[in-house]
Image (tube, grey):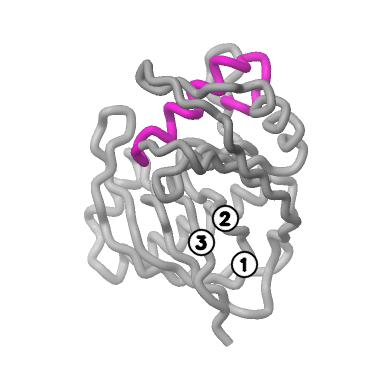
Amino acid sequence: MYVKYPNIKIEKRNSAKIRGYFGNKFIENIELHNHLDNKFLYAYPKVQYKTLQNTPFIIAIENSIPTLHNAIMQTEQIVIDNIAYNCDDIQIQLETKLLNISNKINKYTFLNPWLCLNQKNYEKYKNLDEDEKKIFLDKILIGNILSMCKGLNICVDNEIIVNTNVREVSSNFKNNKMVSFYGDFYTNFNIPNYFGIGKSVSRGFGMIKHIKEVE
């Protein structure tokens, strides 16, 4: 389920604040904030908060759809930085999408920075040459796709192929500067538009869009 608020305009960095607002308002619904007893649940989030062209944009997957739908129907305003935005125009779209191995190669682009390095693998990454860095990132992206599938109870029986073409950028994450990546990648796996890949996808990082199929 894709949810958009076309009359609300916010900055991209405020995706996390949308998540914070819904998470605090409906704290009893774990899937809206991915925390349990103040501890973060390291599982692929089935509710993801993003901005698309400066518009609040939320995705709910599978059994989290009714939870998010109930929440947005009970929300007349979204408050960000003490500014109240009226939710008088909501666009809701339901789609059925498959996540599976494709017999074609798909090209995707990252609409938001891809966070994929933690402190440990960043130390390894920065000491590699350019060719080695690409191979390293390819393997990480394959792992990200497999983690997403595991979190959604999808079994992958065949080999996932990935070819990244990304560049380093600096992203602000929890007031810390982190190395992240923009660019494109090719893979033989079908991924729905606007899903997040990598770290902190519930906050909007790693949002992808399908560009084309490659024969």
Which residues are drawn in magenta? 11-34
Q: Which image quarter is the C terminus in?
A: bottom right
Q: Is residue 195 left or right of residue 120?
A: right
Depth check, mark 3 against mark 2: the one in front is 3
Q: On the image, numbered disc 3 is attached to which residue?
A: 209
Q: What's the mark number on residue 189?
A: 1
The three-letter amino acid code for the residue at tag 2 is Ile
Q: Quadrant of residue 192?
A: bottom right
Q: On the image, numbered disc 2 is attached to which residue?
A: 145
Mark 3 to mark 2 CA distance (whole Å): 14 Å
Q: Dot 2: few (<14), some (14–19), or many (≥20) neighbours within 10 Å?
A: many
Q: Quadrant of residue 138?
A: bottom left
The three-letter amino acid code for the residue at tag 1 is Phe
The three-letter amino acid code for the residue at tag 3 is Lys
State the SS at label 3.
strand
Nearest the viewer among 56 and 169 is: 56
User: Does label 3 or label 1 sit earlier along the sequence?
Assistant: 1
Picture layout, residue 73 above or below residue 165: above
State the SS at label 1.
strand
Indicate whether residue 18 is drawn in magenta. yes
Indicate whether residue 66 is drawn in magenta. no
Residue displayed at 76% across by 33% down: 66
Depth check, mark 3 against mark 1: the one in front is 3
Q: Is residue 165 left or right of residue 123?
A: right
The picture places residue 71, in percent across and down from the top left corner, at 67, 25
User: Does label 3 or label 2 sit earlier along the sequence?
Assistant: 2
Residue displayed at 25% across by 52% down: 169
State the SS at label 2.
helix
Type of secondary structure dominating the magenta stretch: helix
